[in-house]
Amino acid sequence: MLDIIETFEALHTLGQPTPLDHVRRIVIVVVNAKSSPETAWDESQAAPGSIALLIRATGVPIDAYSSDTVELLRDIQARWQSQRKIRDSAALSADPDPVLTEAMHAPDTDLYVVDVSFQALEDRKELEYLNNLPTSFVLPDAAVDRLRAAAGTIILASPEFQRLLRDAGARVVTEPCTADEVQRLSPPSISDATARGNELRQRLSFDSGSRPDR
C-alpha cells in the first residue's frame, strides 16, 4: 500500500493523471501483530533457551516495520496537507512560483492512517490476555472473538478514525443491515483493489531526464 501511495504522489508531482484522482479519502488500517507475552526469565539463574529467544526476537521486526509504516504514511499525510495550504494561499495564486510545482500538484485526497496495536487498549486485563496468546494460525473460537472485539474497540477509539467520521459526516451504525443494504455498501473486492494498484504502478514510467530527485 505504501508503494501505491508513493506512486500516486509521484505522478501528481509530474502532473500526470492517475486512476485515484477522484478519490476523496483513503483510509489505511495498519495492524501491528506483535505480542509481548510475560516470561519468568528474571526468576531463574538459567539463561532462556534458543527457541524462546528466537520466538521473542521475531516480534522486533514486526513492531519496527509497523511503526515505520505508520510514521511514513503520517509524514505523507502532513506533506499533502502542507502542500495544499501553500497551493491554495492567496499569495501563490496571485504570483505562482515555478519552484513550487510540487505544491501546485498536491493531491486533493485526505489520508487517514489508523494504527491498530494492542497497546492502545485501556483494559489492562484484556491487554494482558491478548499479549499472552500464541502466534498461531489456529486459535480457539473464544480467543478469535476477543481479538476481533479488541480490534473494533481500538479502531473506534482511534483519533484518526474519529477524524474520518467527522470529515465525512458519518457515524458508526450498530443496527443490523438488510441484505440489500449490505450489497449496496459492500466495498470493492481485494482483486479489484489489487488491479487498480497494479494499474497505478504501471503508469509510473520515468525517462532518465524526467525522474524527480528524491
Image: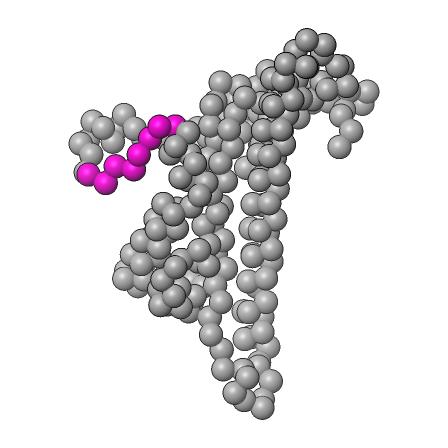
Asked if residue 169 lies in the magenta stretch, the reply is: yes
Name the image quarter holding residue 80.
Answer: top right
Residue drawn at 57 percent across, 63 percent down:
58
Q: Which stretch is magenta?
A: 168-175
Counting from the top left corner in percent of width and height, residue 94 is at: 68, 8
Counting from the top left corner in percent of width and height, residue 166 is at: 39, 32
61 is higher (above) or lower (below) than 155: below
Main SS type for the magenta part? loop
Residue drawn at 59 percent across, 62 percent down:
60
Counting from the top left corner in percent of width and height, residue 90 is at: 63, 14
- Tell me if 72 is positioned left or right of 99 in this view: left
Given the current orientation, which residue lies at the most extreme front position?
A: 91
Of residues 91 and 175, the one nearer the viewer is 91
- Tell me if 165 is positioned left or right of 178 in this view: right
Q: Is residue 100 visible?
A: yes
- Tell me if 185 is positioned left or right of 158 in this view: left
